[in-house]
Image (cartoon, helix red, strand yellow):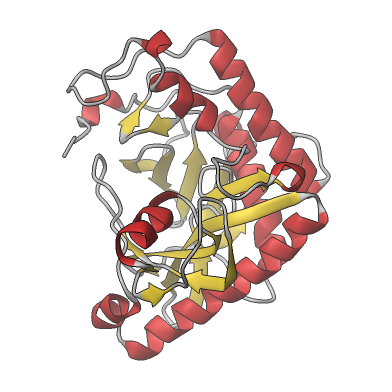
Amino acid sequence: MLVVPTNVIPPPDYTLPAGYSHLYSGKVRDLWRTPEDLLLFVASDRISAYDWVLPTPIPDKGRILTQASLWWFDQLSDICGNHVVSTDVPDAVAGRAMICRQLEMYPVECVARGYLTGSGLADYLAKGEVCGVALGPGLVDGSRLPEPIFTPATKAALGDHDENISIADVRAAVGGDTADRLRLTTLALYARAEMIARARGIILADTKFEFGHDGDGRLTLADEVLTPDSSRYWPAAGWLPGRTQPSFDKQIVRDWLTSPASGWDRGSDAPPPELPAEVVERTRARYVEVLELLTGQPLA
């Protein structure tokens, strides 16, 4: 197992006013406590692949992720409330940050899949099921499932892989009633988002949500939501089961890293190289494209 050293995450590239205390930096987000004892989520331009935070940022990625999340939070608010309090943030992080309520988070990645690919495909090919959900024969990469399924995963530490788990594992972790609420809410959110994306010519193949609860026990949607980092978006016009689908995400980066052109040995302990300007530009363009297609809004 490859563990990413914490020193590959660069320090924040901005300075906040007095009263903000830095709590954590992950692969993409920085988390701060505000003077009002709320949380400031800052989306950076960092990009990760194959359990590494890459040395080359993608310009405007943090703004794209934040704008997409805020738009989706609005579209889904009648299904589940969210943790956003305000976008009135310090100038240094304007456009790429949100002020949010503190929640008690559930230790589960809540994944919904409407199509079979990625780790779900690998599990299906090995066992004929995904996270304990049996699937019929004959499915291939990109197949649309008879109905969306809930396929939870563990929340992995930096450098580790998320691992798919069953609903029974979720029940053991959070209790039966809460597990059922997480499953039903995840599938309801996916159904709404899939419908919205499909109307715009985009397939939402799968996505992950994170939930917590407030002091009154209310289930609350948190973190990012339905961004190109947390979701697989495919152009509907190009969908063809049985092959890898074209996608609106960082597949361009993954493909370059595993190509001879990168010179990188993924199986070694050596960190990935800098990304070429052409790969950075194409990746940024894909992120902007899916944002604008989904929301009908230009990058602000």
Q: 178 or 206: which is nearer to us?
A: 206
Q: Position of residue 74 (x, y in %)?
A: 71, 62
The residue positioned 59% from the left and 60% from the top of the image is 85
The residue positioned 45% from the left and 30% from the top of the image is 47
**Furthest residue toward bottom:** 177
**Furthest residue toward front:** 138
Q: Position of residue 37 (x, y in %)?
A: 42, 57
Looking at the rendered image, the quarter that the N terminus falls into is top left
Q: Up-down: is 258 above or below 61?
A: above
Q: 15 or 105: which is nearer to us?
A: 105
What count of labels does the image hold?
0
The residue positioned 74% from the left and 64% from the top of the image is 195
Q: Is residue 199 left or right of residue 207?
A: right
Does residue 19 appear in this view?
no
Q: 241 or 110: which is nearer to us?
A: 241
Q: 179 or 244: which is nearer to us?
A: 244
Q: Position of residue 5 (x, y in %)?
A: 19, 30
The residue positioned 35% from the left and 40% from the top of the image is 26
Q: Is residue 120 left or right of residue 226?
A: left
Q: Up-down: is 182 above or below 103?
A: below
Q: Quadrant of residue 210?
A: bottom left
Q: Up-down: is 68 above or below 269?
A: below
Q: Quadrant of residue 77?
A: bottom right
Does residue 40 appear in this view?
yes
Looking at the rendered image, the quarter that the C terminus falls into is top right
Q: Is residue 158 left or right of residue 74?
A: left
Q: Up-down: is 178 above or below 238?
A: below
Q: Position of residue 31 (x, y in %)?
A: 40, 45
